[in-house]
Amino acid sequence: MRTPLRPLARILKARAQGENPDVIEAENKRLRHEEMADKARQRSEGRLLVLGLAFFCAFVVIGGRMGTLASSVPQEPRASAVGNPIIGQRSDIVDRNGRILATNLQTHSLYAHPQDMIDPAHAAAGLAEIFPELDEEDLIEDFTGKRKFLWVRKQISPEQMQAVHDIGSPGLLFGPREMRLYPNGPIAAHVLGGASYGREGVASAEVIGVAGIERKFDTFLRDPASEGAPLELSLDLTVQAAAEEVLAGGMSIMNAKGASSVLMDIHTGEIISMVSLPDFDPNNRPQVLTKGDQADSPLFNRAVQGVYELGSVFKIFTVAQAMELALINPDTMIDTQGPLTWGRFRIRDFHDYGPELSTTDVIVKSSNIGTARIAMQVGAERQREFLGSLGFLEPTGVELVEAPTGKPLLPKNWSEISTMTISYGHGLSSSPLHLAAGYASLLNGGTRVEPTLLRQHAPLQGERVVREAVSERARRMLREVVVRGTASFGEVPGYEVGGKTGTADKPRTNGAGYYDDKVIATFASVFPANDPKYVLVVTLDEPSENSGSEPRRTAGWTAVPVAAEMIRRTAPLLGLRPQVDTPQSVGVTLTSN
């Protein structure tokens, strides 16, 4: 109930007493206004209090959320849109010392919206000037047609981007793009393989591996959960570069069609360097051959995919197995009277070594007849089992997508003649990587190692293949091959190299026998032989050393000098100090008169 401004009782009383009734009305108005002001003030204060509480709560919630985010593990944000987002980031690949082998580069793509172009002819002329591979007439046709979107270049440099900016056409647009970069060019190209684009959009592109390590570990390299951790390889970039330089020079000097090398840690199986020539630049990966022999393509990894009859480098396996079975010892005399006849087959030696040789000299002089006779004592079944324990019956497990294609070629019927020919490296085809792994397993003390391209931090003890004493005898025999045998050019002062040569005739492409003037020359070596650390296998395809009156194609003249130079260049990089014998000083005696 509101109080009336002019209450009748008070008005009548005021008039009776001679007072002014307007004063009563004015006083009532004042009181009413004060009451209304008090209510309005209270309402405002309440609203301000509620608003203040709301701001306080908001700040508490935001501050708490910021604290939670700061203390939590970062996670890749997920898009709420339908469909999978394009993942653009990709982890680096580094060598064993953390040096970059593959990384990412932020760049831009260039695309066009022809409907937004003011002068298509001017834009086409400008683009043809910036990018000479583009045809101006084709661009004008595309810009004036019905297409509403057009890729111009999937990736451009900053300088090209600025030049396109200067054209000033609103229909030329840029999108962020991540590209894969190999800063060392062709170094380790066959190991890295290469990358390309998968799903593409104007705002990003999916970088996927197409070969080699990039494809084998594509899931890891693209996984945001890896938090950008690099993939660490066993390769040593410095050693790899030196090995490629030496092998390229040796391939040129020896007039070879191709070449490969594998340098492996004898205890861990880590591949320190792997080279295949000819090679390529993964920044500009060539196309796969559509005709002809794929083995002639620079994309072909000869060290892993190339399976060859590697020749006499297999002889040490035969002798080592026979010693393991206690059939012979290094001094056992072996019948080398030739030729060795088996049915219509004749096995001969490169030279006539007389009626017999010691087991050591069978290796040193590389007698096919002597090795075949030892293999006959071993037998086909035991030989197959032993080579299987060294990994020669299946593809290597190295971390490359191409590895399964390097499957050894085995005889359909492992007969006695197959046993004899396989003993000296014919009748079974395997890759240089198989050979390196077999030598490492035999010479490291006799335990199996698996080749790997991933950094290892400790030796991996595999199953035993021969006794330590047999392994040591095999190393001494291989040392004798370098000191006084077919690999005399392999001597590197201070590093005590041991090894075995192998020269195998190349089979004809039509399967009709072998070439008379084409060979695969191989030198498989270990150094230092007295305390083995590394195995090196060098293979040359169709070499020919032409400094003399007649071409010389044997491994002793071709592959061995190349391997020796490679050891000379890489051993110091591997931290191996040369062991040089210090001559004894002449004693001087002081006497008094």
Image (cartoon, rainbow, N blue to C red):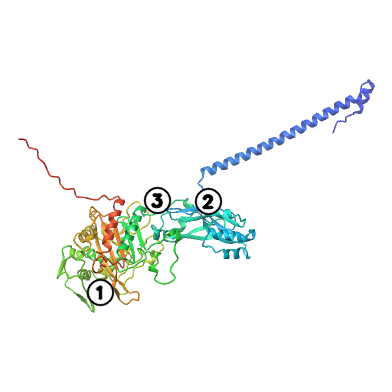
Q: Quadrant of residue 396?
A: bottom left
**Residues at marks 3 and 2, CA–CA distance in whole angstroms:** 27 Å
Q: What's the residue type where badge 3 is placed?
A: Arg
Report the label total: 3
Q: Secondary structure at mark 2?
A: loop
Q: Secondary structure at mark 3?
A: loop
Q: Quadrant of residue 136?
A: bottom right
Q: Residues within 10 Å of mark 3 (few under 14, many from 20)?
A: some
Q: Is residue 498 left or right of residue 154?
A: left
Q: Is residue 117 left or right of residue 337?
A: right
| Mark sitting earlier along the chain (3/2) | 2
Q: Nearer the viewer, residue 80 or 114?
A: 114
Q: Measuring 24% from the left and 55% from the top, which residue is drawn there?
A: 492
Q: Examine the rendering and report whether any part of residue 83 can be seen.
A: no
Q: Nearer the viewer, mark 3 or mark 2?
A: 3
Q: Position of residue 495 (x, y in %)?
A: 24, 54
Quadrant containing the N terminus is: top right
Identify the residue under disc 1: 417
Quadrant containing the C terminus is: top left
Q: Measuring 43% from the left and 72% from the top, which residue is drawn there?
A: 291
**Residues at marks 1 and 3, CA–CA distance in whole angstroms:** 50 Å
Q: Nearer the viewer, residue 364 or 404?
A: 364
Identify the residue under disc 2: 76
**Residues at marks 2 and 1, CA–CA distance in whole angstroms:** 63 Å
- Give the residue at the far left of this rendering: 593
Residue contact between numbered discs 1 and 3, judged by CB atoms under 8 Å: no
Q: Is residue 214 left or right of residue 507?
A: right
| Mark sitting earlier along the chain (2/1) | 2
Identify the residue under disc 3: 99
Residue contact between numbered discs 2 and 1, judged by CB atoms under 8 Å: no
Q: Position of residue 391 (x, y in %)?
A: 32, 64
